[in-house]
Image (cartoon, coloured by chain):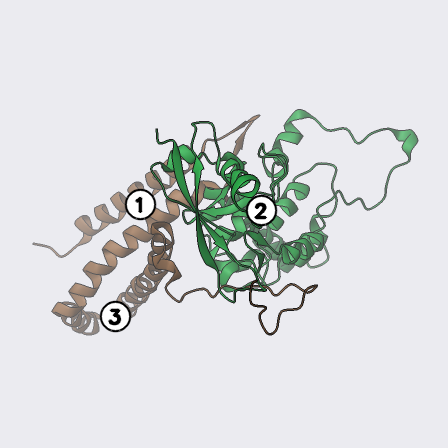
Chain colours: A brown, B green
Amino acid sequence: MAQIAEHYTEYHPRWLRPHISTYWWLRKRSYFAFILREITSLFVAWSAVFLLLIVDAVRGGPAEYGAFLDWARQPWVIAVNAGSLLLVGFHAVTWFNLAPQALVVRLGHTHVPGSLISASNYAAWVVVSVIVGWILIGYGPQR
Amino acid sequence: MPKQIKLQIARYRPEQESEPVFNEYEVPCPSDWVVLDGLNHVKDQLDGTLSYRWSCRMGICGSCGMTVNGEPKLTCATFLADYAPGPVRVEPLRNFPVIRDLIVDLGDFMQKLVRVKPWIVRAAEKPLADGEYLQSPEEMDEYKQFSMCINCMLCYAACPIYGLDPKFIGPAAIALAQRYNLDSRDEGAADRLEILSEHEGIWGCTFVGECTKVCPKNVNPAGAIQRYKLNAALESVKSFFLPRGA
């Protein structure tokens, strides 16, 4: 006959409450991708701060802007920015792919397919990138 | 196709164990047997002490949700042959307290479900003599997807946020709230928003998206929550600029 556990009473359930591991996000690929997306938010924040620093340097005049460029040319800043570019790209892609979940667009009696909503986000991304690129090339440092 | 497949079933008998143990059983594996058939075979032929829930056997009642090889599944819709040559590991749904073997306590969900008022709320009922509340097929299409929820709890089992913070109202309850918000006959959206705007409501969701992936009825709870967030944000902006209402 089975050994009766000390605290067990017949008519009251003794629930088992499984512990969730600190490393739950390593259990599944999709959980890991989610955590990666969340971590990349830090690099989105860094990109915003860097942009504000540029604006502040430009506001301060040519000397301050030159000093900022010297600081930004340091290898570690370039490395952080190159990494940020990749990770912000990843962050953007994950959100563009998830956009159809939040946006339900109707045209007349039909729902716009989710793929079209994602595609419009990507299209907007390309258009904005081209405009920024055109500005940078057109108004960048004169050779 | 193997004639037999091994089931590794989590057993938790509170009078015997303080931690779950796995018992192994060999069950037949014809191509039309689902995991639930395997469990029924164990119960009927091999070990009558095994405890689990099931009812309709056709993906309607939502009572046979379990963790199969690490994934939340309806065991009546999960074929044993897909896991050949095995073994197939069957555990209770994650993120819920286990009462016995494969049976979990769903009381927490039941309490949360009532809070979001998953029924049609009317400010004032019209007299019976005025007839039914009519609805067009287009109006029904708005909420039909969310009305397919069978409360199987696979979404809660897949949601790491619910696992880490059990106060989170959770995917199915929010999807069902959204089902009534989108119903043209309902007038209870403001009441529900009050509850769902709390920290443990829609804002608790960080959009992992697993709830939608595991849903056997394609309800898309993650979509419901994100739409709700958008709606709540618009309502906040409106109440800021138009504090006395439009």
Q: CA distance from mark 1 to mark 3?
A: 24 Å
Figure check: B35 above or below B160: above
Q: Secondary structure at mark 1?
A: helix
Name the front one of labels 1 and 2: 2
Residue drawn at the location 43% of the way across and 27% of the way down: B31
Q: Which residue is mark 1?
A: A128
Give residue A57's mark.
3
At label 3, the amino acid type is: Ala
Is B142 on the left-hand or right-hand side of B6?
Answer: right
Residue B52 percent across, percent down from the top left? 58, 47
Along the line of sight, the residue nearer the viewer: B244 or A113: A113
Q: Secondary structure at mark 3?
A: helix
At label 1, the amino acid type is: Val
Tag 1–tag 3 contact (CB < 8 Å): no
Residue drawn at the location 62% of the way across and 69% of the way down: A8
Local packing at callout 3 (Cα closer than 10 Å; few below 14, some 14-19, many 20+) is some
- Quadrant showing the N terminus of chain B: top left
Residue B242 in view of the camera = no
Name the front one of labels 2 and 3: 2
Give residue B48's mark.
2
At label 2, the amino acid type is: Gly
Q: Are marks 1 and 2 on the same chain?
A: no
Local packing at callout 1 (Cα closer than 10 Å; few below 14, some 14-19, many 20+) is few
Query: Within the image, what quadrant is residue B201 found in?
Result: bottom right
